[in-house]
Image (cartoon, rainbow, N blue to C red):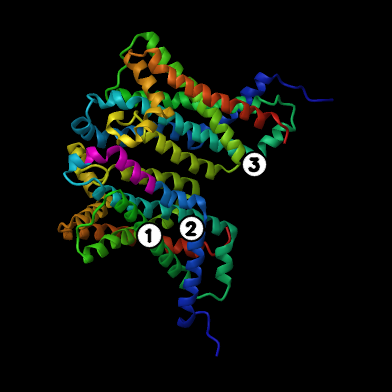
Amino acid sequence: MTTTENSAAVFVPQTLIQSQRMLLHLFRNPMSLVQSIVYPASMLVILDIVLGRQVSAFAGHDSLHGTVPMTALLSAMLGAVAGAVTLGREWDAGILARFWVLPIHRASGLATRVTSEGVRILSTTMLITGLGLLLGFRFSGSLFSALAFVAVPLMFGIAFATAVIAASFTLGKTLLVESVSLLCSLAMFFNPGFVPLAAYPTWLQPLVENQPMSCAIEAMTALSLGEPAGASLLKAAAWSSIIFAVAVVPALRGLRRATVPR
Amino acid sequence: MTAPVRSSTTQWWVLTARTLRGAARGGEAITAIIAPIVFTVSFYVPLQKVISMFGNGVDNFGQFLMPLIVLQAIAFTAISVAFLAATDAVDGINRRFASMPIARLVPLGSRVASGMAKCVVSLTFALGCGYVIGFRFAGSITDTAMFIGFVAIIAVTLILGADVIGTASRNPEATTQSLILPQLVLGMLSSGFAPLEQFPTWVQPFVRNQPVSQFTTALRDLADGTATSASVTPALLWLLTLLVICIPLSLLLNARRS
């Protein structure tokens, strides 16, 4: 008996093969590796060396409770940018068009993106958290909060990656990288993980407190300190759902269009 | 009949104007303006309170941070020069120039000149940002002139170095990516960012002696009007070392016919 290209029997193995291909691309490409892991990891170490003492004194707890979540999220975000650049290149090279004419399950392309982004975000979060542990980061929450701690960047990162894919089809490669990188670096300096909220000017605090990255950081910080995190988790989930909901249709439309050679 | 050969000066000016027109039209001009602004806002606004409350020895963070803002602005410009040099190298423009009646160092001269022009724009905006956050030139006119002169020497050095890296790598994106990390490490692990005593003891020898720290020390003292030969000499020695490495490499890369 032969299985047709859209049968459920081929969906899982095909998704796995393509995910493996995407992850190999990511981890074997020195540039995307530098951008998505080396850069945020260096940032974590440098911030701990340069500002760790002062910020810990200001915050009243170890500054790593802020910088570990911040750099983990930064890693998820910059990795999404690297992924969108690769996507643009594959569109140019016609690989996406070739996949489209092969007997591959129609939904596996999308499932592949979600799976490989998920694996990428989970592994970089683990790496950054591990590095934090070496620097003296201590997790005070329960096992459940540890799971939630890892789930936040996963949720936020996938929403962000969807937005970046949507943006890459409207902005073009160069403008995308520059504008999103600028946005990421601004988000990195204006959140309560970099320095506590009280350090920002009063008029700026509402913005710093409620921007999407801040809500995710707040939730992770609360989880790692073993404090109640319900409200901030809810805010982070709300932001992620909004970003995802706005971006998902243009992203899907763009991915479909990318199956035609440029 | 052969076409008339223009003088090297005219050729240099034509090539420089070509790059500058491209920069004005594309995003590079905006980068030269935005980079110092983003850097100032990102570091001054969040850290002002933290450093002044818990950092000892810094009573005016704006005055303290200013040299680093200037250096980062120049470093960003140098990275864009490296990007341009790599693009020219990989697109074959250099090879085409080499086949034309152009003096060998004219393309290099035009890249350095257009880089310097971008530095002037970036430096202007960096100084403007500095004035907003409370930076003032406290020394004599001579000190201020020496500050500008010093920045110019640093700019030429970094541009030459960036040009060598870009021309040799022939890969615009990888060059940009690989230069951002050293810029970050040298910028943040420097006494331009926080006073030396605030760093952990084990990293202090590196922080104290690395070029960015020495450059900011010299620039800060020139801006304050307290510069002595002791505060400026290490920076000059670093610049001399870098130039001794860059100039021969640059001549080697640019003078040979590919």
Disc 1: host chain: A
- Regarding mark 1 in the picture, which secondary structure is present there? helix
Can you tell which quarter of the image residue B94 is in? top right
Question: Looking at the magenta stretch, what is its main secondary structure?
Answer: helix
| Residue under pointer 1 | A121
- Callouts 2 and 3 on one subunit: no
Tell me the residue at 66%/37% (across/down).
Answer: B93
Give the side of residue B11 with respect to residue B199, left or right: right
Q: Is A236 part of what is drawn in magenta?
A: no
- Regarding mark 3 in the picture, which secondary structure is present there? helix
Tell me the residue at 34%/28% (across/down).
Answer: B192
Can you tell which quarter of the image residue A259 is in? bottom right
Indicate the position of residue B66 as horizontal and vertical percent values: 34, 25
| Residue under pointer 3 | B91
Tell me the residue at 75%/33% (across/down).
Answer: B99
Give the side of residue B222 with respect to residue B157, left or right: left
Q: As displayed, is residue A6 above or below residue A24?
A: below
Indicate the position of residue B173 as horizontal and vertical percent values: 53, 44
Between circles 2 and 1, the one closer to the viewer is: 2
